Image (cartoon, rainbow, N blue to C red):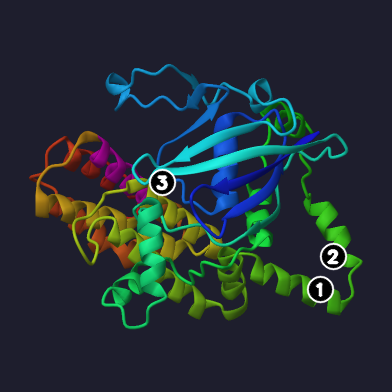
Amino acid sequence: MVYVCRIELNEIDPKIWREFQFHPDVTFHQLHKIIQWVMGWENCHLYEFHVNGQVIRLPDPTFEYMENREALHARREAVKQHVQEENAVFRYVYDFGDDWQHTVRLIKIDSSVSDPTPYCLDGARSCPQEDVGGIWGHQHMMEVLLTPDHPERDHFIGWVREEYNPEHFSSEKVNQELQRQKDRLSPKSLVKRLEEKKPVKLTKSALNKHLKQLSPDQLIDLLKACYGASKDMEKFLAVRILGDEAVESLFQEYRKKVVQEFFPERGFGKLRLQEAKNAISEFERLTGNARYTLWLKLVYVEKGVDFTLSYGDIDERFYYSMASMYADIINQVNEDETAELFDEFEERLDAIISQTEDIGWGFHDNLAEAYAQIQWF
């Protein structure tokens, strides 16, 4: 079963409207999200529903002391608890500043549809700009855009969202997003049933069997599809096909990712250490190159030391992360049976010890203890 509804934005002519369907077990908060996608809003503001004389919204502690109306919790109220008959009408209000008022009508209860995924059936005209100033602001903007010599025209052209066309609406584009978000926009009870299904996993033996059955042309097509599937796959294939040249190029890219967490080109470093460590792990996974991976780890510790020398002591968490990475580097150096990694990076490893003598939190001592474990001295 699904509810088929028509929503109109009030006080705008010609009408901006949509017809869409959704499962009646969704909460009003889920319905809010569905409406945001269907209408084309950007979900930047508060909202509330007015249904049968009751207000349904999310509680907002910021304004709770100013609110004297009783309101039901939008995450806890299912739509079917309050809207049960065809032609029932309720109101949806979005952005209390611009005060966008919508009228929603349940035009049909369709028992023949079992798919709970929301779906946009039809609609007309594009949603107004966010923060345009409500009905009056939208009408003023449209007047300006339709007047070639209006003094404010250049300002509005530079402000409206890219490719904004007030007469355009694409239900296909909306439905692509609704499909992508279907688990979040469907009743939890139905999503749970899907989650309980045993996940399907492609094993190496199954992959090997399938590949052996493919013709050369089919293998080429599959490889091309893999190349276009994601940026990671593109990088992985570049390493496998182009070799050292691709590895060196990726190294520069990921080195920059690590450095910018400490010393970005603009402003101050955000010290998102996990982001930097994720970049190192991703590089290692894509290339499998031990030398350049160790180099990135050294960059991580070196920039951490440089940051402290530039701005002063940080905190225990920061220095624990640096010391842990340094110990990991030493382990990797010791595991290299050729001692080539030690020969290449010995001076940089030693420089880190020298530069940290005056840093607190026991940082220098922890590094020196790890440094003493090098077996190649």
- The label on residue 44 is 3
Q: Which residue is mark 1?
A: 219
Visible residue check, residue 190: yes
Q: Amino acid at mark 2?
A: Leu
Given residues 225 and 297, the one toward you in this image is: 225
Find numbered disc 2 in the image and state the secondary structure of the residue it sits on.
helix
Q: Position of residue 69 (x, y in %)?
A: 39, 18
Looking at the rendered image, the quarter that the N terminus falls into is top right
Q: Residue at x 40, y 65 (%)?
A: 254
Find numbered disc 1 in the image and state the secondary structure of the residue it sits on.
helix
Q: Earlier in the sequence, mark 1 or mark 3?
A: 3
Q: Earlier in the sequence, mark 1 or mark 2?
A: 2
Q: Position of residue 361 (x, y in %)?
A: 16, 35
- The label on residue 211 is 2
Q: Position of residue 228 (x, y in %)?
A: 65, 71
Q: Which residues are magenta?
A: 317-330
Looking at the rendered image, the quarter that the C terminus falls into is bottom left
Q: Residue furthest bottom?
A: 149
Q: Position of residue 245 (x, y in %)?
A: 49, 80
Residue 323 lies in magenta, yes or no?
Answer: yes
- The answer to whether the residues at label 1 and label 2 have Cβ atoms under 8 Å apart is yes
Quarter of the rendering containing residue 236: bottom right
Given residues 84 and 231, the one toward you in this image is: 84
Q: Residue at x 33, y 66 (%)?
A: 256
Give the side of residue 182 with respect to residue 212, left or right.
left
- The answer to whether the residues at label 2 and label 3 have Cβ atoms under 8 Å apart is no
- The answer to whether the residues at label 1 and label 3 have Cβ atoms under 8 Å apart is no
Most common SS among magenta residues: helix
